[in-house]
Amino acid sequence: MQLSNIRTERFQRWIAGNKIFMTLIVLVFLASVTSEYFWTWNNIMNVFRQASVIGMIALGVHFVVLIGMLDLSVGSILVFSGAVILWGQNLFDLDIPGSFFLGAASGVVLGSLNGLIVTYGRVPSFITTLGTMFIYRYFMMWVADAGAVSGNRISHTFLGHGYWLGIPVVVFPLILAAVAAHVVLSRTLLGRYLYAVGQNSRAAFSSGANVRAVTIAAFAISGMAAGLGAVLETSRLNSISTANSGVYYELDAIAAVVLGGASLRGGKGTILGTVSGVLMFSILNNYMNLQNVSTYLQGVLKGLLIFLVLYRQNRLRED
Amino acid sequence: MLLHMRGISKSFYGVQVLDNIDFELRPGEVHALVGENGAGKSTLAKLISGAHRPDDGYLVVNGKPVSLYSPIESQRMGISMIYQESCLVPEMSIAENVFLGTEPRWLRMFTNTVKMKRETKRILRSLGMPLHPNTKVKDLSMSERHVVAIAKALSQKANIFVMDEPTASLSDAERIRLFAMIRGFKAEGFGIVYITHRLNEIFEICDRVTVLRDGKRVVTCKANELTERELVRQMVGRELTQIFPPLSSPTGNELLRVENMTRKPWFEKIDFRLHEGEILGITGLVGSGTEGLAKVIFGEMKPESGKVFWHKEPIQFKTPRQAIDLGFGYVNRDRIESGLFMDMNVYRNLTIASLKKIHRFHMVQESQEHDKALDAIIQLDIKTRDPEQEIKFLSGGNQQKVMLGKWLVAESDLYILDEPTRGIDVASKSELYVLLHELVNEGKGMIVISSDMSELIGLCNRILVMHEGRIVDEMTHGEASQERILQSASGIRG
């Protein structure tokens, strides 16, 4: 076989494997043609800014979905870590790097706890994280009396509102995290084992993968992403509401991951897909706001979009 | 005549599985159906139960010719199939299982549970097993489940029973009880088609025997007219079809020693040694514990007791990872369930067990990975358009080669191969045998578990035969014969 043929074939396979990315490009094109405001620098930056928190969380949830499990606790971890970050700022006068460290650390702890229960307690991930979803949030509500936790450092809001090189600062952590996640999944041993466990955990076990460690790592990464998401979330208002922040974030994140082509049975899905899924939802919201569509109707259309895209994907997969 | 088959032929995808078979079942008769794996026993049973339709020939059941081939139709005509793994619903009670699908009705809407329980109780008592109809099936032992499956057949007014390996999961006492039940059926004039690998049972319970070989009927005769040896010869009766490379005379230092190893219910008190440059064959019938033995040696399961020595050093594995680090490689018998990653490309499937050797700071070195994988692809002649193609697009034989290639890449010293040539055509088999010989000539050790006797005889320096979890026979290459293996495996010898 000619080498050039193999190249063409690989390119075709890449296109086939990244259909959602192609769909995203088509969507952007259609939105730009039909709305004169859409394709402006400010608006595109808005799309990214709106996508930042869910995007960060979805990157983490992607790891858990990849091994065929679910993480429903990320919204609650976001609240928990958010409160920890703001208290940290108030008590120790932490700046932005300190906040990132605190968010990541608290997220890793809570996420690892999920992973330990799933592996050593042998509780299905859905039930484990359903339980911890309540525990993490209501614990914080109890501590904070169901109110908001506020920070007193104004510099923190630079992250949520500032610009650097004309780009919202909040977008940079998302890009960095996406690149890091992509590198971990496609280049490292952990990435290989994550795909292996997701596709066939028995075969992974007999090929020498430490299935338990891989599972715990996936949940820890998911928790860390939620903790980093909390840094971005708190930087907008410099406060977090233990009762109202992060509600439904876990479902938005799972929706974006699934829209991005990952299989809930595990073993399939790329970071490019998940990022495309997040941006697709963000663009949809943004575009419909520009067209004055009711927020409530937007939710209905979001649901329809999931059906539409996944129906098409499954049809294509069977062929 | 209860059942009458004439000139039955059946082929799948151009492969002739049954060729012009005649078969009949008289009232009050137990008719044994025997043959090697792949001789066509199960296909014939499926034809009787209506799961397949014959290409040619006809069936007459209870005097009526069969025109519609479906499981429901054959059930209506009085045929009942009792499978190895009986199809009962564990979460339902005995009575609900017995009448599943044929529940007595009450105003055509409600199930008449009182009648169901009464009838179930009556049938169970007649079978000499007075279980309570409300007991859930999941709480029953294997033999009790068998009785429930039989009761289900009786409740459907069947008078022809097809039993496929009914004693495979039964203890001796349970088997004796089953045989008493079968004798009761004979007295009532029912007919039983009895499929088995265990030849001694044929002489114990069966009236007539039909031997199948490669889809053809070899002989039908009274069971007491045959001796065991004759029966085995009738079953095997063919020359070796594969070409095996000449055996090198082994054998170097001791590589692996297993002492007194037990893991119930798979096997107990296993002892053997493996030397450098030696191919050791292990065989046995379904349920003899060979698969469990491989898993324990490889660290997938823990033994209850016993010792394993590797280069005379005692070893103990908690996970396969430790076995792999020492140089063990295990080709599983089930490549889809627990062998391959179907959505990964060929490279990654080949290197998944040796990632620890090709990384730097936990980053996979892809150029090294591709070099090593390509070596294996060339050595094994794996046919793939592009190694970055996902493995699900490869043929079964090539997938099997990738399973072996995984351990070539890992540079294993001990290969445990469970049914390594399953699904491979004859030509690739011969290539594979040559390769296995090259490996052992480099001083590696190999354990081949196979149910293909000609393969073991041609390939192995020594063969161990297991029966019901114990090693019952050991033979060298020169001593091995199909008759001896089959006799030992079915527990006749020794």
Image (tube, helix red, strand yellow):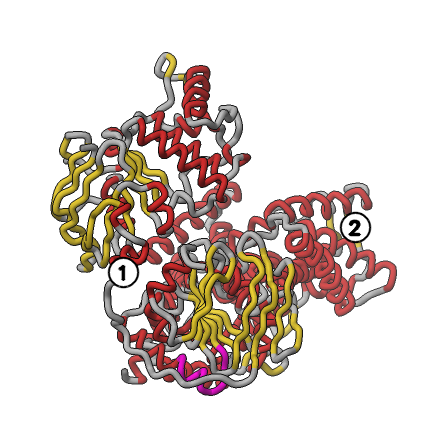
Depth check, front residue: B50 or A154 = B50
In the picture shown, does residue B280 fall above or below A20? below
Cβ atoms under marks 1 and 2 closer than 8 Å: no
Q: Which mark is residue A149?
A: 2
* Quarter where residue B89 is shown: top left
Residue B17: x and y in percent read: 21, 55
Residue under the point 29% across and 37% down: B192
Residue B396: x and y in percent read: 33, 66
Q: Which mark is residue A176?
A: none
The magenta stretch is B436-445
Residue A284: x and y in percent read: 47, 53
Depth check, front residue: A208 or B452 = B452
Depth check, front residue: A153 or B349 = B349
Q: Is residue A35 left or right of residue B157?
A: right
Residue under the point 43% across and 57% down: A35
Q: Which mark is residue B233?
A: 1
Residue type, numbered disc 2: Val
Q: Residues within 10 Å of mark 2 (few under 14, many from 20)?
A: many
Residue B437 part of the magenta-drawn span: yes
Helix, strand or loop at label 1? It is: helix
Report how far apart the C-alphas of labels 1 and 2 lie in the structure: 85 Å
Depth check, front residue: A251 or B380 = B380
